[in-house]
Amino acid sequence: MNRSSTELRAKYAAMSRTAMIAGLIGVIGLVVGWIVEADKFYQSYIFGYAYWITITLGMIGWMLLHNMTAGKWGFTIRRFLQAGTFNGGFLTPLLLMAVLIIPIIIGSGELYDKWMGAHDGDHVLENKTFYLNEPFWYARMVFYFLFWIFLTMTLKRLLNREERTLDTSFSNMRTIQRLSGGGLVLFLLTVNFSMTDWMMSLEPHWFSTIYGVILLIGGVISAIALCIVMTVSSSKYAPFSKYLDTKTYHDLGNLMFALTVFWAYVSFSQYIIIWSANLAEEAGWYLKRTEGINEYIGYGLLVFHFIFPFLVLIQRKWKRDPNRLKRMAIYILAVHFIDIFWQIKPAFQRVGEASGLNIHWLDFAAVLGIGGLWLWLFLGGLANMKEPLLPAHDPRMKGAKPIADEDLATVNA
Amino acid sequence: MSHEQETHRPESYGMIAEFDSPETLMAAAEKTRDAGYSRIDAYSSFPIEGMVEALGQKRTGLPKLILLFGFIGMCTGLFLQGWTAASNLGITIGPYMFYGYSMNIGGRPMLSFPNFIPVTFELTILFSALAAFFGTFILSKLPMPYHPLFNSERFSLASQDKFFLCIEARDPQYEKGKTEEFLEGLNPDSIEEIGH
């Protein structure tokens, strides 16, 4: 059951083609929807975009965190993190997300009409114009993407230097750690503000200082879940087959477990503050989301995004058995879909008439279209990556768990 | 210690073998376990991944105990708040009578579960943390001011750069000559019998 890394890359390439076809089907659906129902299109599109941008950002977060801390688990998933963000060349998921924001810009007049349009003497919005105005919104958007691309591009170059030079001294590490440490601070700020700009400002009267963190954490769990799915799927092929052990799965499972708890923590902290204060301009956000069927989705999230994964992932056997862990990871990716749906879609409903479910076939087309293209570039990037799929020459990986010399050949194959 | 135990006490505590690296210790532990010894222990200055399995040690019931106490803490938190804030129930404890005092705060429901969560959460964590701390203490038989292994001169190196494997005399398979022979087969740096 030990297959070569060439076969693994062929598998990635095949999956990448499947993803591309799925993506194209989704894109055709989106184009049809855009022609037929333009108003519904933008609502669904920003939902699909939110699902995948949070995962992309989650991957950047893991990369920065691992550069700061090291650890066996992170070396296993480093290539997935790189392929999911910036992987050299133009065909990378992060650049794709930068391009795919164009439909949101086109539809901004419709999505953000509450603050981009006339305020009609709305005092609250008038006082927010120093931040919520169109030129500044565009300038921030450009800055976010430039920063994310610069950060991941530089990290990619630095992290892969050892592969080219086989220089095993630690000279590179200090630069990487400094960049990741400083980058992490600015990264969290940019994520927080970008989520405020793109998602929170759909309801410009409402505000929550932890909103960006809630969305990011959802994305961070999904990013590690995607990495777990990839790791387990690759585990029978070189170079992973010789390197992976139960402890690595346990670590990855523990990270996913810890973050489900953190997701519950931040989500609940936002809820309890707004619930206790019970102020009109804050409570409206939850009123929409606790009306009609949205209420059951909200309770469902409590059970299925926290209590159920908590009770499952607290058990050792679910973290140490790769197949069970993979099943749980797929589950987390599915629940993130519902979470983002509940966060974004009720924004387009009004208090008092949110009894129905604001679901549309375009929602699925958006997630499939953007996701298909995303996975096409992600898997394609892995298949064509110049570097070996495990960073065998990283001096810190040698410290965590070195690859045996006789296996190095299979890594480089 | 009772007299009965005193008379059955084996002459020595056990036999220790010294190794140079965690890998050799691990290999030795696995061989010892596979040879059927059950009362064995390993000593090193840092935790070694996989050593618990190599020694064939069973997992303790501590995680379940912690879960139980966490659950008790959760119930305590919910009960305490439900009683004091949402009922007028009187409870007699000894000569004293304690009353709940329900209050309408801002028109919110008496049983305001969102507000109860922080305290419930904290008590859950507190109870399980205390259970984990004292459970570990008791199961490890701490505090332990004396241990027979302290009699060995070389054993103090276990806190520096040496690694020790100990087969205890209470092991049913323990026989001085045989065990020594077995340990020698593991190629240790030294072997020593430890008295009480």
Image (cartoon, grey):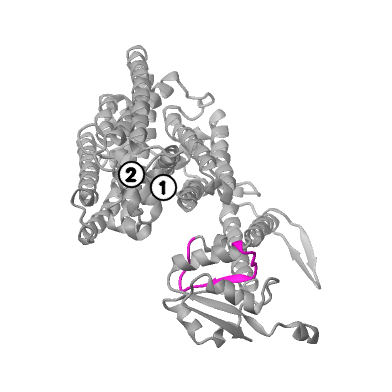
The residue singled out by tag 1 in the image is A242
When the figure is inspected, residue B136 is found, relative to residue A248, above or below; the finding is below
| N-term mark: 2 or 1 | 1
Distance from Cα at disc 2 to Cα at disc 1: 9 Å
The residue singled out by tag 2 in the image is A410
Asked if residue B145 lies left or right of residue A410, the reply is right
Which sits in the foreground, A323 or A121?
Answer: A323
State the residue at coordinates (61%, 56%).
B120
| Chief SS of the magenta region | loop
Magenta stretch: give its range: B34-49
Image mark 1: chain: A
Q: Are marks 2 and 1 in contact (CB under 8 Å)?
A: yes
Q: Amino acid at mark 2?
A: Thr
- Place of residue A91 in the rendered image (x, y in percent of width and height, measured from the top left): 24, 31
* Residue B55 covered by magenta stretch: no
Q: Amino acid at mark 1?
A: Lys
- Place of residue B185 in the rendered image (x, y in percent of width and height, measured from the top left): 53, 70
Tags 2 and 1 both on a single chain: yes
Can residue A292 be seen at all in this image of the molecule? no
